[in-house]
Image (cartoon, rainbow, N blue to C red):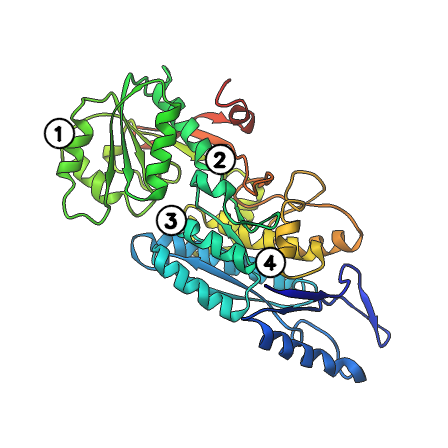
Amino acid sequence: MSQNIASDNRRPKIICGRIFRRSVTLSYNRRGFLRAAGGAAALGSLSGCVGTLDTERAEPVRFGAILPLSGALEQVGSHGKRAVEQAVADVNEAGGILGRPVELTALDSEASPDVALDRYQTLVDEGVVGFVGGLVSDASLALAPEAAADGIMEVSPASTNPQLTDAGRKNGRKFFGRTVPSDILQAIAMAKILDSLQYADADSVSLLAVDNAFGSDLAAEIEANLDATVVSNVGYDPSADSFDGVLDEVFAGSPDAVGFVSVPGQEHGILDAYAASDYHTPWVFSAGMFGSEIPSHYEGFYSASLSSVQTKGYFRLSRRLSDIAPLAPYAANAYDALFLMATAAEHAGEASGPAIADSIQSVSGGSGHTVGVGEFDRVRSLVDAGRNVNYQGAASAVDLTDSLEPLSSYIVEHVNNGRIEQLELLQRQFFQNGGGQ
């Protein structure tokens, strides 16, 4: 349980003849009392109007990131970390949140729910108001109830499990959001590719999914949306020494196509085994699986990929992070996650988890004055003028629903002569109609 005492921070304050924008929020709970007391003592130094109130002297607003920074998902997590760091730098360059500097603590989840929970406790002890993570759905499913109980905002850049639509709710607030759409959309897109005459045109399908909550739940959603007959639904362990038995099970029913659910970094073993086998069947990949280099055995494969690289914000972020280009999947989503939380806090006039939860949809709901990547100074100007803000992100327009998740567009992609060709854009209206044309 916590008690917040907050000043009215939406407007500039005049102190000793000078104008300042300053958030004064003291949060008292079992973990934060000493931090609040320290902040109150610091504010007391203003009584004599000595010096100036600036971001270097203000109590920082603390955010965290819980991402896989080692193991098979290291590149995805590390690029996400760099993107979050860039968002923090952009906010601080504009003067911080409510005149307060932003500090970031990024920790390695090791793609493990148990490790993610341990890292989360570290962030709680440091007094974060929100964090970016988890990356894999298993971690986010474990973290969401903890964050809600503590009143800390969590925004995932990559967790797509449908169960997260209702996760992280407490006392009428939702403390879990994401900048990537639910797997329900991805399942509809993959089912269309598998069924459609102009694409895989499969009468029978085998589903192969990474053996975790993300994989099994997305496979179930694909099966629910397919017209084709599912002849097998197989899970696989990406760390296994051999995949021959898994492939034999997948192809036992002679499927016309394979629907493949995985994440970048966990697909190499199973696909290398397929390349060395005698099987030859078109595959349909889940989002994010086509990288910059296309192996020869991907020829004829399809993917339902998120439509994200066409935004102006994506190119702006890519220029800022040119040293690691091309950006790994979900890096742009990670930037959006942090920038959205910062914008929500500025809009709310209070840097706290509950304030961010209350405000985050209103700054990303599709209406208001547009702000984009790196434009936190414009966020401040609009808020000070009493204007509505609409963040248009690096990964997408964002436009969060009441469940704090976007309805994004998908692109049907196909590997032809070693190159990725884009065949069709499935826009948000397609999914709003349940996959109908």
Question: What secondary structure is marked by label 1?
Answer: loop
Q: Sequence-wise, which precedes: disc 3 or disc 4?
A: 3
| Near-viewer residue (196 or 175) | 175
- Seen at 56% across and 57% down, the residue is 87
Query: For mark 4, what is the residue?
Result: 353
Q: CA distance from mark 2 to mark 3?
A: 24 Å
What crowding class fits label 2: few (fewer than 14 Cα within 10 Å), some (14-19), or many (20 or more)? Answer: some
Residue extending furthest toward the right: 17
Single out the mark in the foreground, 2 or 4: 4
The amino acid marked with disc number 2 is Ser
- From what the image shows, is residue 229 above or below residue 339? above
What crowding class fits label 4: few (fewer than 14 Cα within 10 Å), some (14-19), or many (20 or more)? Answer: many
Q: Sequence-wise, which precedes: disc 1 or disc 2?
A: 1
- Seen at 75% across and 51% down, the residue is 382
Q: CA distance from mark 1 to mark 2?
A: 34 Å
Q: Position of residue 151 (x, y in %)?
A: 57, 58
Q: Position of residue 337 (x, y in %)?
A: 54, 51
Q: Sequence-wise, which precedes: disc 1 or disc 3?
A: 3
| Near-viewer residue (288 or 134) | 134
